[in-house]
Image: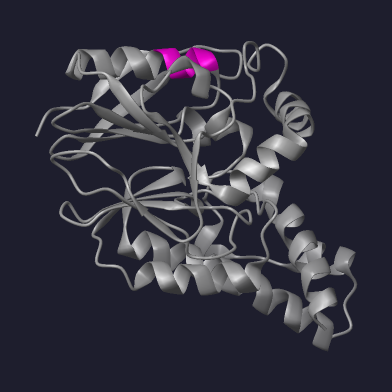
Amino acid sequence: MAAAVWLALPAAGEAGSLSIQPVAPGVWAVIGERGNANAGFILTRDGVVVVDSQINPRAAGAMLRAIRKVTDKPILYLVNTHAHGDHVFADHVFRPARGIIAHERAKVALKSRGAQLLNEYAKVVGAKEAEGAKVTLPTITFTDQMTVPIAGRTIILRYLGIGHTVGDIIVWLPNERVLFTGDLVYVNQLPWLGEGETREWLNTLARMKALPYERIVPGSGPVGDRRSVERFERYLSDLRRAVIEAFLKHQSLEQLKRTASFPEFSHDLKYREWLPVNLEQVYHQMEKER
């Protein structure tokens, strides 16, 4: 298997690097720096299938140059795992010959709230990092499952349920036992809980675990395996358990934020920044559930 390719890439205002890592023959993970969004690409007999388009057009350009170091075959399809800007607002860089594929709910979100999502994205990454970003609507959508129509490799797209958003999909390569999870899974990093609901998200992860895969390319963080999915599942479960205990003790949200601790995850990226935000979101979710 080929060695990883490292490319210079300024990120978040300072020099960094984008890691292009092989995860199976002809299957590559593109790992964003310091927890930025991941992407990937799959080489087939006829051409390339890209999975997500990186955090911004500059990173997408670096990814495209990496692809060209591997093959000169055309980009045939671009698959969007969900509608958030750090995964889709550089789609136009790739210009896939046969189309951009996403869940129908992702297309609805981009079509109805594209300007809002673009504005929120720019606030998060900063104006400089968002330069050149734009909304590009998917051209091919599905509801439950789709096999990418391409020769020489089986690539299955599946909707497993609500998670990070209402329109997340996975990219499953059954022969290679590889799964691109999008932001349904984070590895060694606390998640932004997005527009999802944690109870449904846990059900979605249970369906994911039923698939026969060995390696995953998460939405953020390093390449993982089945244990990575189980660990992320524990984090969501622990969040809900902490909130339930707070309800039983009649603790306020602010008390919960001050006292809650998750030692297993304390060294994960963004633990200090996002744990209070995650607790607040789950607290309000579970208030509605009650």
Left or right placement of residue 116 versus residue 169 in this view: right
Q: Residue at x 53, y 22 (%)?
A: 90
Figure check: 79 above or below 145: above
- Residue 125 in view in this figure: yes
229, 63: nearer the viewer: 63
Residue 232 percent coordinates (x, y):
48, 62
Left or right placement of residue 192 versus residue 289 in this view: left
Figure check: 220 above or below 119: below
Residue 95 percent coordinates (x, y):
43, 18
- Residue 191 in view in this figure: no
Residue 228 percent coordinates (x, y):
38, 59
Q: Residue at x 64, y 49 (%)?
A: 192
Q: Residue at x 53, y 74 (%)?
A: 203
Bounds of the magenta span? 57-61
Figure check: 207 above or below 18: below
Left or right placement of residue 208 versus residue 274 in this view: left
Give the quadrant of residue 106: top right
258, 276: nearer the viewer: 276
Task: Determine the main secondary structure of the stretch shown in magenta.
Answer: helix
Q: Is the N terminus in the top left, top right, bottom left or bottom right quadrant? A: top left
Q: Is the C terminus in the top left, top right, bottom left or bottom right quadrant? A: bottom right
112, 226: nearer the viewer: 112
